[in-house]
Image (cartoon, rainbow, N blue to C red):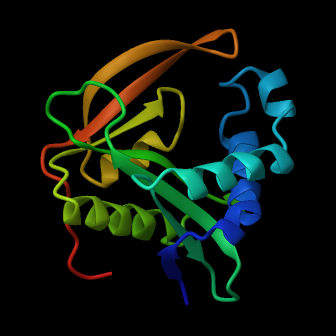
Amino acid sequence: MLTIRPAEVKDAPAIAKVHVDTWQTAYRGIVPQDYIDNLTVQNRTMSWVRLLERNPNLITLVSENHDGRIVGFASGGPIRHREPNYQGEIATLYVSPRAQRQGHGRRLFMALSNRLAERDLKGLFVWVLAENAARNFYEAMGGREVNEITRDFAGAPLREVGYGWADTPNYHTL
């Protein structure tokens, strides 16, 4: 049974593990290798503890597999930059490589979208690295390319594509 629930501070180490594992798999060859090599669960855990304790506007959800182990997470809230047609943003959505294609990402997306809609945030936005295969996921969820930017990340220019949903999708059945 797949369970989606709000994250708690005690979940930070499991969230960090998924975060690091996913980055090391999905972003190899995209993000500078020295950055990927220096990611640690310990450092990510501290970042997640701070985010979960100190950011009341951030909604963070976890996805547990049948044995209660956290295998995915998503976070979002009010958009963090100027994007005139969108008020809500997905900041993160990661699923452990071994748990992908089992419905975790879709369910996390739907649950987070519902919570953003409940906060009356109109329109949904997410940035995705242009070379990331996960772009297909957001397209399958109905997102449309609405923006593109190149940013310096760890000394390398990385192109990102912004996907948007004019209305924040509200899913009635999970």
Q: Is residue 62 visible?
A: yes
Q: Residue at x 54, y 65 (%)?
A: 101
Q: 101 and 149: which one is in front?
A: 149
Name the image quarter holding residue 144.
top left
Labels in figure, total: 0
Image quadrant where residue 158 sits: top right
Where does the image place residue 123, in percent across and percent down from the top left? Answer: 18, 46
Which quadrant of the figure contains the N terminus?
bottom right
Residue at 82% from the left image edge and 50% from the top image edge: 41
Quarter occupied by residue 30: top right
- In the image, is residue 92 above or below residue 158? below
State the residue at coordinates (19%, 51%).
121
Q: Quadrant of the C terminus?
A: bottom left
Q: Give x and y (percent) for residue 137.
A: 41, 50
Can residue 20 be seen by looking at this rendering? Answer: no
**Residue drawn at point x = 30 percent, y = 66 percent:** 115
Nearest the eye: 155 or 46: 46
Front residue of 116/100: it is 116
x, y (%) of residue 21? 76, 51
